[in-house]
Image (cartoon, coloured by chain):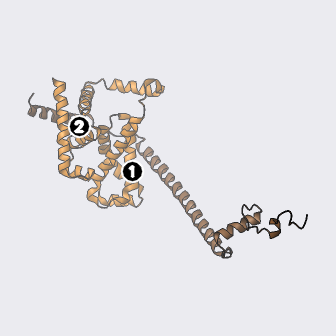
Amino acid sequence: MSIFEQEKSLDRLLHSYREATGYGEPGPNFMPELWARIESRRSASLTFVRLARVFATGAVAVTLLAGAYVTLAPSPAPVEETWVENVANHQLAQGTAYFGPVQVQTAAYHLSPTQNPVK
Amino acid sequence: MLVEFELIERARNGDAGAFNQIVHAYRRRILGTISRLVFRPEDVEDVGQEVFTRLYFSLEQLRSPDGFDAWLYRMTVNACYDHLRRARRRPESRMADLSDHQILSADSAAGQDASQIESERSAVRDQVSVLLGAVSEQDRILLIMKEVEGLSLKELAAIYKVNENALKVRLFRARQRVLKAMGNKSV
């Protein structure tokens, strides 16, 4: 079969296919089912909108409360010591100091036993 | 266009009667198109309802009346794509999975198919579905829209939102593949 004949044959076949696949009237439930589907989708989207509104209102309320707290809560006094001093003081207050002020030993401690006034 | 734009305007404003009229005007055409794109006849009305549901919720987005048909076709093609994608993931139902009522309906449908005309039509459908199996799903849908639905290149360009030359090339290649499959079959 030549290419031209094949082309014609394909056109004829597709034309017959169009006739063979025509769709008649839909069933009696087509419209009621269509409206049921529309209604269910509408109610689903309404539920989503309501939920979104609740979340948005909640978010605004939380933001306002947080803003009010930040504005009204007493602010801590400004720190006037360095970080090292601050840590040291904190450790001392807790009684867990790993380092403390340098211990200056008295001169008597270094005296030889002969010079020691205790003996 | 099968309906007046005024009817669409009314449907857009929530007039259920106007929407029913639009569905009534287009349903045979749309269901016919779907039946050619989706090979399972039992799914045609389901996909059709999906198309009209999408139409209902997107009527507000329609800007001009001229584009209504192309717009509805695009919705139809997209719904068919979605259905075919879902169908690929879904396992085929077997006779054992069907209820007694469904088996009886299938038997009665098979009995009706026994008529001469119907058997010829069935042969044509089978032949075309085998030939169109030679091209990809996208090309099959494109070929059907052009060659069977009879849409012009301009209408197809509006549906697919691509330029006509690109469509021409794609259609030509798809048609060549189908012709090759046809040649192989007749050899």
Quadrant in which the C terminus of chain A is drawn = bottom right
Question: In the rendered picture, chain B carries what hue?
Answer: orange
- Along the viewing direction, whichever of B57 and B3 lies nearer the viewer: B57
Q: Nearer the viewer, mark 1 or mark 2?
A: 1
At 86% from the left and 64% from the top, the residue drawn is: A114
Residue B17 visible in the current orientation: no
Query: Residue placed at 68% from the left, 66% from the top?
Result: A87
- Name the residue located 45 percent from the left edge and 47 percent from the top edge: A37
Total labels: the figure holds 2
Chain letter, disc 1 residue: B
Circle number at residue B154: none
Image quarter in which the N terminus of chain A is found: top left
Tell me which amino acid carries mark 2.
Answer: Arg
**B4 sits to left or right of A108:** left
In depth, the one of B80 and A42 nearer the eye is: B80
Q: Position of residue B74 (x, y in %)?
A: 30, 49
Apparent side of residue B111 relative to residue A105 in the rendered image (left or right): left
The residue indicated by pointer 2 is A18
Residue wearing tag 1 = B54
